[in-house]
Image (cartoon, grey):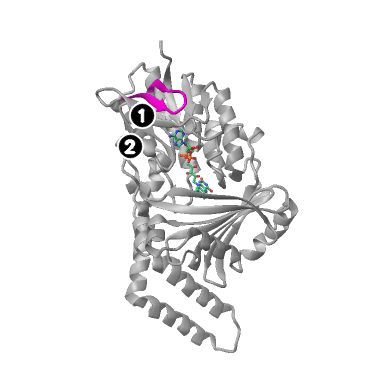
Amino acid sequence: TEEKFDAIVVGAGMAGNAAAYTMASRGLKVLQLERGEYPGSKNVQGAILYANMLETIIPDFRDDAPLERHLVEQRFWLMDDTSHTGMHYRSDDFNEPTPNRYTIIRAQFDKWFSRKVRAAGAIVLCETTVTELARDASGKVIGVHTDRAGGIRADVVVLAEGVNGLLGTRAGFRKVPKPEAVALAVKEMHFLPEEVIAERFGLTGDQGCVVEAAGTISRGMAGLGFLYTNKESISLGIGCLVSHFTASLESPYALLDAFKDHPSIRPLIAGSEIKEYAAHLIPEGGFKAIPQLFGDGWVVIGDAAQLNNAVHREGSNLAMTSGRIAGEAIATIKSRKRPMTRDNLSLYKAMLDKSFVVEDLRKYKDMPALLHTNSRNFFMTYPRLLSQAAQNFVRVDGTPKIEKERATKAAFIKARSRWGLVSDAVRLALAWR
Ligand code: FAD
């Protein structure tokens, strides 16, 4: 007879690995399918790992996970063409025995996570693409069709296929995300000797630093530049909303080149050897872009479910948490000997709604629309005004301070009008609430 699994997980990224691990370690018969040559091969981006969410799944991950640096410093920069105005937060508290955030290189990290998934008892097949969901006459998902292993049956299919979500879209479970709900990010890995990175950022041992930058670097589009320090490399990139790229005809590559050439960034990567280049989408539609999360015989998790907090630049932790919760819900339904119907699988959404994942996205539900429609002000006008104000404040040239203050005030009013300033502040405050 045909082999049947308790669950099939499509994708071996952060979400899929968390779900497969959770279910396999609770004794479920789990098959995980990944189209890449190995888990992580399609996920080359270096990134920040939020330890807490992994610790909930694998408490002793620090023993053998490939972690690059633990973060002790975060820099937020607002940039114009020649300067940056920064807020830096650095604390010795982050040199704790169990640090809170690490930089990781996904290609290595996903491989490690996958070994844990296998050790927990799941079968993992790479280089296997799920081409379609198998459904019965009533529409219930009963398994998958693959390009290599034929059709395979399972009680439930966990869609962890990432932001593109082709299977879910093709099955009619979700719409193609709108261009204003996804960002396109391009990224490079700049290799430098460990001690050079330590010196440039004032780090010792495996301490790390992150720079996140907004401003004229995105040329008026809603976007962000970022720099993460790894052990012997720096991940550097920039991403903007796809809708803005389309409207502006800006090229992501040109933007990245300009970011690298910015006088505040150039010295940080000087002399580096560029080894990897990657482009990837990020779901940024927030709460209002979350699609239907469950149905008869299926659930969707991680980026495929658009679970990404663009304001705080958190994605992998939402992916892991939604994967863990989906795995726990499925294991609970199974232990009650209930079928994987839409009604029963609603447990996943009920549990997710109570977690920080949905709670955080709900908090910022109006932010994506605000940034999309006001990007020129927030990513061009204000960063410029702030830079001018900062320069005006620190430059000593004999101009009386009162005149300087008047000039700064006048510049803000000229650029946005009194009413515009108040309205921008109110809208930002409301979206942040
Ligand atoms: P993915 O990691 O994309 O995994 C999906 C997997 O499914 C892939 O391995 C893919 O090959 C596989 N797959 C797809 N379709 C099929 C199919 N039909 N059959 C078989 N396999 C399939 N998040 C953070 O938390 N911190 C950061 O610092 C951070 N930085 C980022 C920087 C960039 C440039 C980008 C693009 C994203 C960043 N993110 C960050 C977001 C984070 O990467 C994602 O939220 C996270 O990877 C989502 O995990 P996932 O498992 O849902 O999807």
Asked if disc 1 and disc 2 are in contact, CB closer than 8 Å, the reply is: yes
- Magenta run includes residue 153: yes
Residue 205 to residue 244: above or below:
above
Element type at mark 2: helix
Q: Which of 9 and 345 is in front in this view?
A: 9
Tag shown at residue 170: 2
For disc 2, does the CB lie below 8 Å from ligand 1? no
Question: Horizontal and vertical percent for residue 418?
Answer: 35, 77
Q: In the rendered image, which residue does mark 1 sit on?
A: 133
Question: Horizontal and vertical percent for residue 342?
Answer: 29, 27
- Find residue 175 and report its image quarter: top left
Image quadrant where one finds the N terminus = top left
Residue 261 to residue 403: above or below:
above
Tally of numbered tags: 2
Amino acid at the residue labelled 2 = Arg
Q: Which of 288 and 420 is in front in this view?
A: 288
CA neighbours of label 2 inside 10 A, class few (<14), some (14 to 19), many (20+)? some
Label whose residue precedes the other's in the sequence (1 or 2): 1
Element type at mark 1: strand
Query: Which residue is pictured at 73% across the width and 52% down the height?
Result: 193
Q: Give the range drawn in magenta.
A: 141-155
Q: Nearer the viewer, residue 364 or 308?
A: 308
Query: Which residue is pictured at 54% across the width and 88% down the height?
Result: 400
Residue 429 seen in this snapshot: no
Residue sitting farthest toward the right: 195
Residue 397 seen in this snapshot: yes
Tag shown at residue 279: none
Question: Horizontal and vertical percent for residue 114?
Answer: 56, 30
By secondary structure, the bulk of the magenta-drawn segment is best described as strand
Amino acid at the residue labelled 1 = Leu
